[in-house]
């Protein structure tokens, strides 16, 4: 199947190849709001951001993903000294819980929301974790939002759950920590610098992941972009084969690409931000012919 065919394929066909669990790392929400002409210190920012987030979550679930795991708050946010930022973080989480609970009961009864990091959640957020679990007790699709106040907290919680329950396998540890079975994540869509950390990806749930990094900040993802990622994940990256006879020699016909190819991950500064450095693509006429 070509990419064009996949982009136009019926949703049922796309769902068959969608991963069960997806890691979704979003950053730059204030940057995104500023680009949209929204005052990041206003209440409009919070409502607009949550609306954008819900639209992306709906897109994931509609295309067959059952578990979306996303870092909601990270240590870098708790470390900020921006005036009133910490207090507003908790207000925004409360607004997210309220809005998601309303949508899950009124429009999407198969949706659940869970706040991860119960052992280290700030006192202000613990009642919200219990409230949202009671409001969305069951469903086919779950948005797992992690709140990590301190670096190292994901590992601490993991080890505490293992000691508390005596878990002997990875599967046992997942059930002990999350209260249910969650398939390993094999796909990550993230923003910005190509990097992975325990604050972004829960250690127990990281499988062999295909990682994709957009440079559009905030909750911005179109159906075409998602389907393009799913196509690459399901088809283009599946290059392994048991019998590699003659495989290495095939590289000779694309010598320029392999000998002059770019290094992924290098960047430049755009004002206060990092951005991928432009690359000079090698001649790929033979590859694209």
Image (tube, helix red, strand yellow):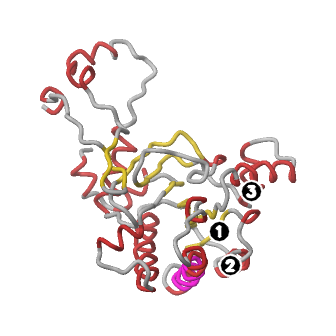
Read off the residue under disc 2.
128
Circle 3 residues within 10 Å: few <14, some 14–19, many ≥20: many
The C terminus sits in image quarter: top left
Residue at 55% from the left image edge and 86% from the top image edge:
102
Nearer-N-terminus badge (1/3): 1
Please say if 182 is above or below 219: above
Nearest to viewer (mark 2 / mark 3)? 2
Magenta segment: 92-103
Q: Picture coordinates of residue 82 (x, y %)? A: 52, 71
* Mark 2 neighbour density, 10 Å: few (under 14) some (14–19) many (20 or more): some
In this view, the residue in front, 103 or 3, is: 103
Q: Which residue is mark 1?
A: 115
- Name which residue lies at 45% across and 61% down: 27
**Badge 2 element:** helix
Q: Which residue bears the numbered disc 3?
A: 177
The answer to whether mark 2 and mark 3 are in CB contact below 8 A is no
Across and down, in percent, residue 126 comes to 73, 74
Q: Is residue 144 magenta?
A: no
Q: Position of residue 212 (x, y in %)?
A: 39, 47
| Magenta span main SS | helix
Q: Nearer the viewer, residue 33 or 8?
A: 33
């Amino acid at each position: 199947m070509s990419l064009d065919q996949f982009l136009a394929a019926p949703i049922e066909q796309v769902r068959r190849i969608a991963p069960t669990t997806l890691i979704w790392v979003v950053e730059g929400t204030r940057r995104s709001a500023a680009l949209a002409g929204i005052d990041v210190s206003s209440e409009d920012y919070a409502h607009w951001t949550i609306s954008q987030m819900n639209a992306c979550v709906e897109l994931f679930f509609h295309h067959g993903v059952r578990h979306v795991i996303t870092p909601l708050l990270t240590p870098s946010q708790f470390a900020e000294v921006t005036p009133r930022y910490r207090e507003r973080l908790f207000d925004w989480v409360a607004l997210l819980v309220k809005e998601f609970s309303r949508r899950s009961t009124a429009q999407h009864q198969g949706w659940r929301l869970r706040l991860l990091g119960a052992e280290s959640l700030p006192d202000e957020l613990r009642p919200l974790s219990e409230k949202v679990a009671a409001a969305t007790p069951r469903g086919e699709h779950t948005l797992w939002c992690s709140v990590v106040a301190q670096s190292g907290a994901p590992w601490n919680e993991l080890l505490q759950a293992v000691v508390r329950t005596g878990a002997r396998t990875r599967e046992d540890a997942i059930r002990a920590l999350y209260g249910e079975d969650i398939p390993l994540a094999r796909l990550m869509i993230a923003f910005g610098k190509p990097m992975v950390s325990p604050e972004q990806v829960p250690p127990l749930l990281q499988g062999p992941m295909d990682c994709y990094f957009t440079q559009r900040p905030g909750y911005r993802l179109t159906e075409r972009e998602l389907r393009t990622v799913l196509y690459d994940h399901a088809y283009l990256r599946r290059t392994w084969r048991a019998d590699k006879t003659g495989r290495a020699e095939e590289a000779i016909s694309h010598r320029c690409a392999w000998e002059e190819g770019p290094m992924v991950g290098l960047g430049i500064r755009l004002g206060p931000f990092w951005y991928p450095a432009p690359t000079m693509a090698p001649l790929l006429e033979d590859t694209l012919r």
